[in-house]
Amino acid sequence: QITLKESGPTLVKPTQTLTLTCTFSGFSLSTSGVGVGWIRQPPGKALEWLALIYWDDDKRYSPSLKSRLTITKDTSKNQVVLTMTNMDPVDTATYYCAHRPSLPGTRDYFDYWGQGTLVTVSS
Amino acid sequence: SYELTQPPSVSVSPGQTARITCSGDALPKQYAYWYQQKPGQAPVLVIYKDSERPSGIPERFSGSSSGTTVTLTISGVQAEDEADYYCQSADSSGTYAVFGGGTQLTVL
């Protein structure tokens, strides 16, 4: 079955760069149509889509955060890494990675999610 | 940037029907997806491609689309359905994903 798990620091200081790793199993990121995305959720607030990487290394970013985000994949390790620069307290959130299925005729959506990891930005 | 609009809250009594709407200009062109999120848990996909139900999701969950509005309907609401519900779609060009602001469903 498909599983994903996020890992990374729980606390970062303002202006620092956040690096999160999504380690997954049950699928391959070399399979046509498949992708892995990142979504975050500030405490008590709504979900916000951040970025997505596809099997062919195509990458998409949230327009509002594009300048601060980088997403990469290591297919051999079954990992996807998200970096976010210049962290601010407003970036405090639970960060989720999720599986984007390969379903003809559809755009991006997520059928399996990791448990999420809470990242707090504070000095 | 593109936005999806949901009502902040919906309340229903057990056994009644709950309808949660989501509005967006690109919805006639892009499919909508719905997620259920209970406190402290990751979201769960309950509807994809406007009206398809993933395996394991109860039949009381259904979706529909009409113009710029999509609707999640929960028939015969149960106490366990109390959760936040999020719609998700894409911008008109399909370049990036976007989530609605979420709707808190309260079962009275």
Image (cartoon, grey):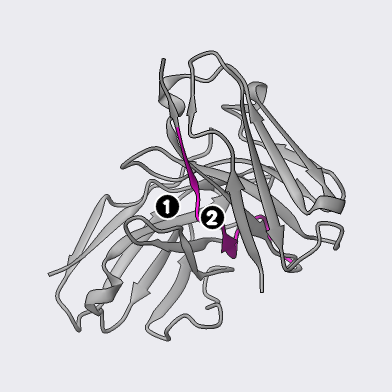
* Spot occupied by residue A39 in the image (x, y as percentages of width and height): 54, 45
Q: Is residue B79 above or below residue A31?
A: below
Q: Residues within 10 Å of mark 1 (few under 14, many from 20)?
A: many
Instruction: Describe residue A87's horizontal placement relative to residue B21 as left or right.
Output: right
> What segment carries the magenta color?
A105-119
* Spot occupied by residue B47 in the image (x, y as percentages of width and height): 50, 70
What is the distance, in whole Å, between disc 2 and disc 1 at their CAs?
7 Å
Task: Report the amino acid beneath label 1.
Answer: Ser
Residue B98 colored in magenta in the image: no
* Spot occupied by residue A63 in the image (x, y as percentages of width and height): 61, 30
Residue drawn at x 43%, y 77% is B62
Mark 1 lies on a secondary structure that is strand
Residue drawn at x 41%, y 15% is A123
Task: Report the amino acid beneath label 2.
Answer: Leu
Residue drawn at x 30%, y 69% is B19
Label placed on residue B23: 1
Instruction: Describe residue B98's horizontal placement relative to residue B37 as left or right.
Output: right
Q: Residues within 10 Å of mark 2 (few under 14, many from 20)?
A: many
Question: Of A86 and B74, which appears nearest the observer?
Answer: A86
Residue drawn at x 22%, y 61% is B10
* Spot occupied by residue A16 in the image (x, y as percentages of width and height): 57, 17
Q: Are the residues under marks 2 and 1 on the same chain?
A: yes
Instruction: Describe residue A49's horizontal placement relative to residue A81 as left or right.
Output: left
Q: Are marks 2 and 1 in contact (CB under 8 Å)?
A: yes
Label placed on residue B27: 2
Question: Of B32 and A9, which appears nearest the observer?
Answer: A9
For disc 1, the chain is B
Question: Residue B35, located in which quarter of the rendered image?
Answer: bottom left
Residue A112 colored in magenta in the image: yes
